[in-house]
Image (tube, rainbow, N blue to C red):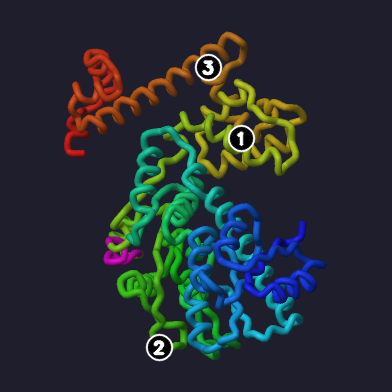
Amino acid sequence: MKPQILIVDDEVRMQRLFEINLSPKYIVFTCGNGNKALEILKNREISLLVTDMKMPGMNGLVLLQEVRKMAPELPVILMTAYGTVETAVQAMKEGAADYLLKPIKMDEVEVLIEKTLAISRLQDENRDMKQELKSIYGMENIIGRHTAMRKVMDLIQQVANTKTTILIQGESGTGKELVARAIHFGSDRASRPFVVINCAAIPGTLLESELFGHEKGAFTGALKTKKGRLEVADKGTLFLDEIGEMPRELQVKILRVIEEQKFQRVGGTEDIEVDNRILAATNKDLKQAVEAGSFREELYYRLKVITISIPPLRERKEDIPDLVEHFLQKHRNNLKKRASRVSESALCLLVEYSWPGNVRELENALIRALVLCPGETIETRDLPEEIRRDGKEETEEGKIPVDREKLKQMKKEIQRKIKAEMERKFIEDALRLGKGNILRSAAKVGMDRRQFQNLIKKYGISKEDFIEE
């Protein structure tokens, strides 16, 4: 469908001129005043507004201001016979995409319209892409009903819109970068760059140049000036993955960036100021690294203002069924596979496996299973050998079902564990709402006080832990 353009000019001759010249490429609407223009904008999908500056009643600038309230992203071009610099500057400050001087030249108008529409399309695509990224990396993609994961999600929401430095801790594969992206895309920096640098993947001799950039001639091979990740991430977020692997000499420089928001390129002499939000992640115990002398104490305490600890998957097995469902839906269409569910025996293996590679290993195992699965249900034969082998080793202890009756027992045990964890979480949340007061907490969730107390005793929950909260 052709783009729809609205021309506003009180001269009928000008309206006709635009109609004749633009109609082959665009659907053209015309009117002679601002009020009529606003009415058309309410009822039509207009892609571009071109308006005269001087008109009876509502002038072009006032119309522009009204359009900004109604359709903030709509590009507007102003035409004026009074083409002073002040008029043009005022129009651009009010949000005009560009301006034209009368008497207009139609070939110049057509070029400007095409350019403005092209820029508008790119901006729309950029907004759509950022919205898609936000949906991909937003909070909804962090899966977990376990108490520790609920705390992680609560912390993300609390800290996302601050500028506080955050240290994310967890074993490899637990989803540290996913948490970092959720923080970024949940903040007011979401439209700005999210830049990742893996401190363990880049040799120390190159890491400084990658972070800070370098000036031309700073070292052999520096043929031109290059921006570092810190400059690329200006106004956005810099994620330092595996910061425990960063050389000590660079740790001092990163500390300066965090505290002063300035640095120098390699080979440079001038300070460069940036506005970065720093997030860091590690699978190491940084406190032990400080004691061993491999990590600077002052940087450690500067990073751990807020610490988010992600539990390993083996400690939150009740999340595995939800993660399995999430990854199946995520990958089945891309892989063009029919499988949409996991058999109960396969799910039992997945739940009981120790997952040394954590969530990343689970996702890869399900991708493999989807590729190999010939039907609609993933069976144990489709799972990686190490998961099946682990299951065979445990068969002797009766942990993995070998017949229908044992399968039923296993299902009941898994359901019991999941129910227990959900009940515990429910009681803890209720106590948090009631600030540790049993009567108030029970009332808030619609439970009998005695029943509530019985569950507290059953799970060994201390109400005192919630009084201060």
Mark 2, residues whose alpha carbon is within 10 Å: few (<14), some, or many (≥20)?
few
Query: Along the line of sight, which residue is nearer the eye, 226 or 448?
Result: 448
Three-letter residue code for mark 1: Glu
Q: Is 447 above or below relative to 239?
A: above
Q: Rounded to the nearest whole Å, what is the CA distance between mark 2 and mark 1?
A: 55 Å
Q: Which residue, given by chain and number where applicable, does mark 3 sit on?
A: 411
Which one is earlier in the sequence, the residue at label 2 or at label 1?
A: 2
Measured from the top left, where is residue 7 in percent x and y? Answer: 66, 69
Q: Which residue, given by chain and number where applicable, does mark 1 sit on?
A: 386
Q: Quadrant location of the N terminus?
A: bottom right
Q: Quadrant location of the C terminus?
A: top left
- Which secondary structure, mark 3? helix
Residue name at image x 65 percent, y 72 percent: 116
Q: Residue 270's mark?
A: 2
Give the magenta-colored segment's residue range: 295-301
Question: Principal SS element in the magenta part?
Answer: helix
| Image quadrant in which you'd find residue 463 | top left
Q: Is 77 above or below relative to 141?
A: below
Q: Rounded to the nearest whole Å, what is the CA distance between mark 1 and mark 3?
A: 22 Å
Q: Residue 181's mark?
A: none
Three-letter residue code for mark 3: Lys
Measured from the top left, where is residue 18 in percent x and y? Answer: 73, 73
Q: Rounded to the nearest whole Å, what is the CA distance between mark 2 and mark 3?
A: 65 Å
